[in-house]
Amino acid sequence: MSSENTQADKVLQEEHLKDNLSRIKHKIVIISGKGGVGKSTVAVNLAYGLALQGKKVGILDVDIHGPSIAKMLGVENKRLEVSEDGVRAKPLKIVNNLYAITLASMLQNPDDPVIWRGPLKIGAIKQFLADINWPDLDYLVVDCPPGTGDEPLSAIQTIGNMDGAIIVSTPQDVALLDARKSIRFAEMLNVPVIGLVENMGSFSCPHCGEMIDIFKGTGVEKAAADFKLDILGSIPIDSNIVVTGDSGRPYIYDFGKTKGAEVMQEITKKVIAAVEK
């Protein structure tokens, strides 16, 4: 009897997965070869940017071991609620047309580490996509942990038919090695690369306004040239990005007149143009 129930549950999950994915118009994955490059910052602000353009957006955090999306969206202490069907949970509503799912909203204690091997992580990602009652979406933005391991692989394979990948990197030449691996990873999974985003590109001196290249190098430019890809934008270093990320506010909106926010707005428009062409 239990095996029959298990099989029925699997069939139902597959039906939910197929239904959810059929109601998402565009799916974008945000990846990076190494950590600390601001990938989640780009993912969050792209999601907000798309929402500001009138799109209905979902952001899915598949960083199982280090989920940061909840804090950056200001929903760190919110828990999932049961949806109208009385069975599945509904995603966290950030604003009227922005929704999110992250493991952080399911942990009892944010300080507890998630000590999971591959199969558990793969199962969780599938649950995020099938066992959550997602609304109809124009875009699903998937924020992955760094590297080319279980999480980005499972997310891409489970979703299928990805509209594209965005590679995030910093300028220094050593980042070229990681950016190239991310590009090849996307190519091997038949995911078109929408473009590269250079983060922490430069810093404007608050006293004289001179632009300073703290992270020197041309790694992103070299990777873009070698693989014939577009650089969607170069986001400068701005302390306000840190402030908004820590306080759960959208930098692209709260500091919309700054150089960094203008670059993020331009990145958003380029993504829309590339995906909806």
Image (cartoon, helix red, strand yellow):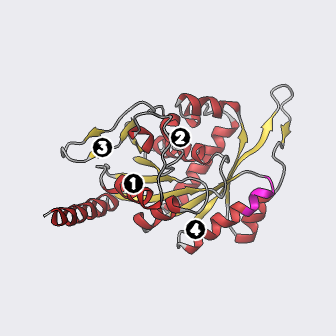
In this picture, residue 105 sits left or right of residue 39 = left
SS for callout 2: loop
Distance of label 4 from label 2 (alpha carbons): 23 Å
SS for callout 3: strand
SS for callout 4: helix
Region in magenta: 172-177
Distance of label 1 from label 2 (alpha carbons): 17 Å
173 is within the stretch colored magenta: yes
Closer to the observer: label 3 or label 1?
Answer: 1
Closer to the observer: label 3 or label 2?
Answer: 2
Pointer 3 or 1: first along the chain = 3
Q: Amino acid at mark 2?
A: Ser
Q: Residue at x 28, y 64 (%)?
A: 14
User: Is residue 212 at least partly visible in the picture?
Assistant: yes
Numbered label attached to residue 186: 4
Numbered label attached to residue 68: 2
Pointer 4 or 2: first along the chain = 2
In the figure, 239 relative to 55: above or below?
above
Numbered label attached to residue 90: 3
Distance of label 3 from label 2 (alpha carbons): 19 Å
Closer to the camera in the image, 12 or 204: 12
